[in-house]
């Protein structure tokens, strides 16, 4: 029994290490990466995106094309990023990462929303004055961000938004990747987020409410 105890302690330690790394999306064994590589082209085809093969075996490749009228790129080898092109006529700089500036960029102002969910989600918040007012007053956007954070907060490394591009980076893997089922479910949510920002930047555009696809559970 005494000889078994160290072995059991070691096995318990290894099991705990494995569970922690999986909970933090480290994928130390590479199982998730290999599965994502195998399924990547298949999920791209289901989304109507072109699969661009990688240059090297240790890469997954990328998906590119048009999805819901937006140009998108899915780049698992590059910080597990998803990029959605935007059409926002006013300057905006939002990020879940804090960019410590003493003054706002030229022609922009700090966005201080009436709603805490917006301010909690975006640590960096700058926009042109007109758009800043729209962002600060939008209750529907704040509510959407609260649900989005609940659904994707643990997996999200960062999300940034400019007047041309929305970029989301994910935490999957010691060697970065994006699981196929995440590609399938996150992309529509990012498109909806992009459309909500575009709608706010065009005052005459209809508000997006009935189209919402996001669900809190994940």
Image (cartoon, rainbow, N blue to C red):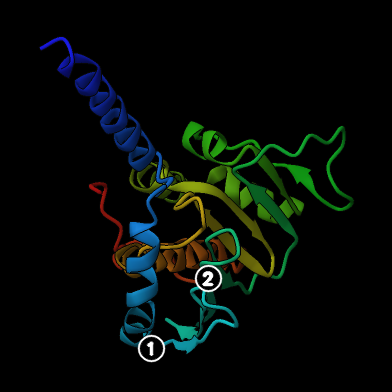
Q: Earlier in the sequence, mark 2 or mark 1?
A: 1
Residue located at (42% from left, 42% from top):
153
Which mark, by number, is residue 58? 2
Q: Which residue is mark 1?
A: 48
Estimate the x, y position of residue 139 in percent, counting from the top left. Answer: 45, 45
- How many residues crowd around disc 2 within 10 Å: few (fewer than 14), some, or many (20 or more)? few
Estimate the x, y position of residue 77 in percent, counting from the top left. Answer: 56, 67
Which mark, by number, is residue 192? none
Marks 2/1: CA–CA distance: 25 Å
In the displayed structure, 5 sits above or below 48; it is above
Residue located at (16% from left, 18% from top):
4
In the displayed structure, 44 sits above or below 210; it is below
Estimate the x, y position of residue 74 in percent, counting from the top left. Answer: 51, 73
- How many residues crowd around disc 1 within 10 Å: few (fewer than 14), some, or many (20 or more)? some
Residue depth check, mark 2 versus mark 1: number of the one nearer the observer: 2
Task: Classify residue 168 by image quadrant.
Answer: bottom right
- Is 199 left, or right, of 89 in this rendering? left
Residue located at (30% from left, 25% from top):
13
Camera-side residue of 95 and 44:
44
Estimate the x, y position of residue 11 in percent, counting from the top left. Answer: 24, 28
């Amino acid at each position: 029994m005494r000889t078994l105890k160290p072995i059991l302690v070691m096995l318990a330690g290894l099991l705990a290490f494995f569970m922690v790394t999986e909970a933090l999306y480290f994928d130390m064994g590479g199982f998730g990466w290999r599965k994502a590589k195998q399924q990547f082209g298949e999920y791209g085809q289901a989304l109507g995106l072109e699969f661009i093969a990688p240059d090297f075996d240790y890469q997954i490749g990328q998906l590119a094309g048009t999805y819901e009228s937006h140009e998108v790129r899915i780049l698992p080898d590059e910080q597990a990023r998803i990029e959605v092109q935007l059409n926002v006529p006013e300057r905006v700089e939002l990020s879940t990462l804090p960019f410590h500036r003493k003054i706002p960029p030229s022609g922009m102002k700090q966005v201080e929303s009436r709603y805490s969910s917006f301010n909690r989600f975006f640590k960096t918040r700058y926009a042109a004055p007109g758009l800043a007012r729209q962002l600060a007053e939008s209750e529907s956007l704040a509510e959407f961000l609260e649900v989005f954070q609940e659904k994707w907060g643990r997996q999200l490394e960062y999300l940034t938004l400019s007047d041309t591009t929305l970029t989301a980076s994910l935490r999957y893997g010691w060697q970065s990747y994006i699981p196929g089922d995440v590609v399938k479910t996150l992309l529509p949510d990012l498109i909806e987020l992009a459309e909500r920002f575009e709608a706010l930047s065009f005052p005459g555009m209809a508000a997006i409410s009935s189209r919402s696809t996001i669900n809190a559970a994940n």
